[in-house]
């Protein structure tokens, strides 16, 4: 199994956090927490970057609500700031998992392709 180094530094990089903030914003443009975060974007990202590197970043909890389509379910939604961190982690780790779980498939050799009549 291949080891990957410096993943945490990649997650905490300012560029990754900035891209993650925009990814977390998708579908949340009209929501107050997202608007507040983007009104203070640079300060929020610098604070998040610092907290992650120092190990002082804490999860903000969940907001619970029910949806009824197509059936009743209880949904737990993370705070917007936590969603940014989730997106930052996924942006770094997802490509590594995709390579491992879904290796590129080679086309079959010419001799194995069935001939059509």
Image: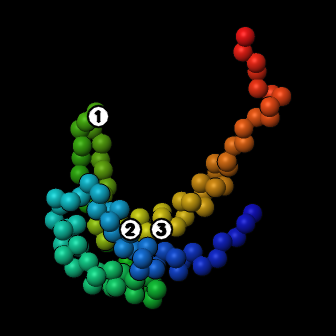
Task: Look at 49% across and 74% down and name the residue there.
Answer: 11
Q: Nearer the viewer, residue 73 or 52?
A: 52
Using residue 90 as the reference point, say whether residue 110 is left or right of it: right
Dot in front, 3 or 2: 2
- Location of mark 3 (residue): 89
Task: Look at 25% across and 36% down and name the residue there.
Answer: 69
Q: Position of residue 30 (x, y in %)?
A: 16, 58
Q: Nearer the viewer, residue 29 or 79?
A: 29
On residue 71, the disc is 1
Q: Position of residue 56 (x, y in %)?
A: 41, 85
Dot placed on the residue nearer the N-terminal end, 1 or 3 = 1
Q: Is residue 36 visible?
A: yes
Dot placed on the residue nearer the N-terminal end, 2 or 1 = 2
Farthest front residue? 117
Farthest top residue? 117
Dot in front, 1 or 3: 3
Dot placed on the residue nearer the N-terminal end, 3 or 2 = 2
Task: Look at 48% across and 64% down and name the residue there.
Answer: 91
Q: Answer few, some or many: residues within 10 Å of disc 3's Cα (few below 14, many 20 plus, some between 14 and 19).
A: some
Query: In this figure, which colouring scheme has been used for the structure?
Result: rainbow
The answer to whether marks 2 and 1 mark residues whose Cβ atoms lie closer than 8 Å is: no
Q: Position of residue 76 (x, y in %)?
A: 31, 55
The answer to whether marks 3 and 2 mark residues whose Cβ atoms lie closer than 8 Å is: no
């Amino acid at each position: 199994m291949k080891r990957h180094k410096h993943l945490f530094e990649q997650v905490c990089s300012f560029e990754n956090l900035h891209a993650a903030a925009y990814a977390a914003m998708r579908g949340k443009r009209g929501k107050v927490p997202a608007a507040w975060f983007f009104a203070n974007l640079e300060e929020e990202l610098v604070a998040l970057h610092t907290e992650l590197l120092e190990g002082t970043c804490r999860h903000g909890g969940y907001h619970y609500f029910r949806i009824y389509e197509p059936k009743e379910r209880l949904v737990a939604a993370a705070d917007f700031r936590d969603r940014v961190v989730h997106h930052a982690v996924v942006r770094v780790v997802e490509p590594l998992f995709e390579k491992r779980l879904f290796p590129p498939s080679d086309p079959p050799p010419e001799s194995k392709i069935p001939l059509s009549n």
